[in-house]
Image (cartoon, rainbow, N blue to C red):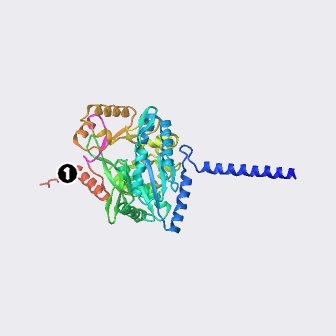
């Protein structure tokens, strides 16, 4: 009998140990290891549970999203270990400040969240700003990065967890754009912005198939003759209600929605078809198209581009593909394969934003790149600032020594154009010469220039 009791007791101890171990494993899986707060996964589950309970009882749930100001600067100056110390301290503060009914979480990086049932959200938000902004000593230095807080409330602002988080983030973003160290509550202004964005998203999906996103063209000028020798392709959206929209108004959204590739392909195809006539008529020599780093990271990009080009009448030798240094830094081997494959078909490759990075010259030495485009940030002070002028002149000399042609973009006045011409820049583009224009306007300008350049025929006198 004694043996039986001992066996049962031992079994009970083992079951209790397994349950304790399982509980510990679960707790660790739900806890942020640095701060000890709830992690993102557990936070999302807790928020959904709170909202469900509030629906049944008719209660409210307030979500506070907290983001540190200038945290990156702290990491850069004192190191990542100092940043970790600050985050751990903030975890302790939040845990100590929260009521029993509140849940504090670290969502990742320097972003935190608090789920609460408080009614006075403004007062709670300000207390969070004050709490996080209190100074802390790290490595003998007083650190006070400050905090921005965005707030959204269920069911007033949103009816589900996804929208509640999105609206709190929108309120947070508004604070960050105003300098931080304060809070913002989701309101009618942000709701109107949400509706406007939702409408714009729907319009953008429709615009691609409707052919509303079209190529525009900016002339590329030969520095010696002043003649238009090429065009750069740019995207514009002919919105039926808002009129003509520049890329900044829709490209970031297109990237978020996964539509940027469809837009790039539509603009590329339309631009090549339009420009093919200009090339065949001798109006221009080249057409430059920008390619996003995301497309370049596709191993099949160059083959797909060649296939699309073959479906137009534009000769491969007239096309220049502009790539950025960002892509070269991400995958130099893949860049080489794309560039060599394009070059084998006669397509030229230009390195855009030249002069803004560290490995441009190395890329020119080791890759078959035929053109560099001087970044507009370098052009704005040439001819005025002696140091900038010397730097640009040295870059032009280095590029010429490597046998590549040079295009300066962002030329906006005569002083810049004269300096670039005197230092041997091959080609230029910018508002000083012409703004981007529609295909119809570009066609008219090119043909007018051709007619003006043609020699005037003198009629022969009739023989007496």
Magenta span covers which residues? 420-433
Q: Is 20 placed above or below 397 here? A: below
Q: Residues within 10 Å of mark 1 (few under 14, many from 20)?
A: few
In the rendered structure, the answer to whether residue 404 lies left or right of residue 44 reads left
At 86% from the left and 50% from the top, the residue drawn is 3
Q: Is 193 placed above or below 324 here? A: below
Name the quarter where the C terminus is drawn: bottom left
At 44% from the left and 42% from the top, the residue drawn is 326
Question: What residue would you read off at disc 1?
Answer: 456
Q: Nearer the viewer, residue 125 or 282?
A: 125
Q: Is residue 365 visible?
A: no
Residue 242, by quadrant, is: bottom left
In the rendered structure, the answer to whether residue 177 lies left or right of residue 50 reads left
Q: Nearer the viewer, residue 352 or 150?
A: 150
Q: Is residue 170 visible?
A: yes
Callout 1: helix, strand or loop? loop
């Amino acid at each position: 009998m004694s043996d039986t009791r001992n066996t049962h007791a031992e079994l009970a101890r083992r079951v209790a140990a397994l349950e304790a171990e399982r509980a510990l494993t679960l707790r660790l899986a739900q806890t942020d290891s640095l701060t000890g707060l709830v992690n993102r996964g557990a936070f999302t589950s807790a928020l959904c549970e709170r909202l469900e309970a509030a629906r049944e009882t008719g209660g409210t749930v307030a979500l506070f999203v907290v983001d540190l100001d200038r945290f990156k600067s702290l990491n850069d100056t004192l190191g990542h270990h100092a940043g970790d110390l600050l985050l751990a301290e903030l975890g302790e503060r939040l845990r100590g400040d929260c009521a029993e009914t509140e849940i504090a979480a670290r969502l990742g990086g320097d972003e935190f969240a608090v789920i609460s049932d408080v009614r006075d959200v403004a007062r709670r938000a300000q207390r969070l700003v004050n709490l996080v902004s209190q100074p802390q000593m790290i490595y003998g230095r007083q650190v006070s990065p400050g905090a921005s807080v965005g707030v959204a409330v269920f069911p007033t602002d949103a009816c589900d967890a996804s929208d509640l988080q999105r609206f709190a983030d929108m309120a947070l973003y508004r604070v960050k754009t105003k300098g931080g160290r304060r809070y913002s509550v989701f309101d009618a202004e942000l709701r109107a912005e949400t509706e406007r964005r939702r409408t714009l998203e729907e319009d953008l999906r429709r615009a691609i198939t409707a052919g509303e996103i079209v190529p525009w063209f900016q002339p590329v000028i030969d520095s010696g003759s002043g003649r238009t020798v090429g065009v750069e392709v740019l995207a514009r959206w002919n919105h039926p209600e808002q009129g003509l929209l520049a890329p900044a108004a829709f490209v970031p959204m297109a990237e978020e929605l996964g539509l940027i590739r469809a837009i790039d392909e539509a603009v590329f195809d339309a631009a090549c078809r339009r420009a093919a006539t200009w090339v065949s008529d001798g109006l221009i020599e080249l057409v430059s198209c920008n390619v996003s780093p995301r497309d370049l990271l596709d191993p099949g990009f160059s083959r797909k581009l060649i296939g699309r080009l073959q479906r137009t009448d534009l000769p491969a030798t007239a096309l220049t593909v502009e790539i950025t240094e960002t892509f070269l830094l991400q995958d130099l081997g893949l860049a080489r394969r794309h560039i060599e494959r394009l070059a084998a078909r006669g397509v030229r490759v230009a390195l855009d934003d030249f002069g803004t990075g560290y490995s441009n010259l190395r890329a020119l030495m080791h890759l078959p790149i035929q053109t560099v485009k001087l970044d507009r940030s370098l052009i704005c002070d040439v001819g005025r600032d002696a140091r900038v002028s010397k730097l640009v002149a040295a870059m032009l000399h280095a590029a010429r020594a490597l046998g590549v042609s040079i295009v300066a973009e962002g030329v906006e006045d005569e002083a810049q154009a004269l300096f670039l011409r005197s230092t041997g820049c091959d080609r230029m583009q910018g508002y000083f010469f012409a703004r981007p224009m529609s295909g119809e306007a570009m066609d008219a300008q090119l043909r007018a220039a051709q007619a003006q350049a043609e020699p005037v025929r003198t009629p022969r006198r009739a023989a007496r």
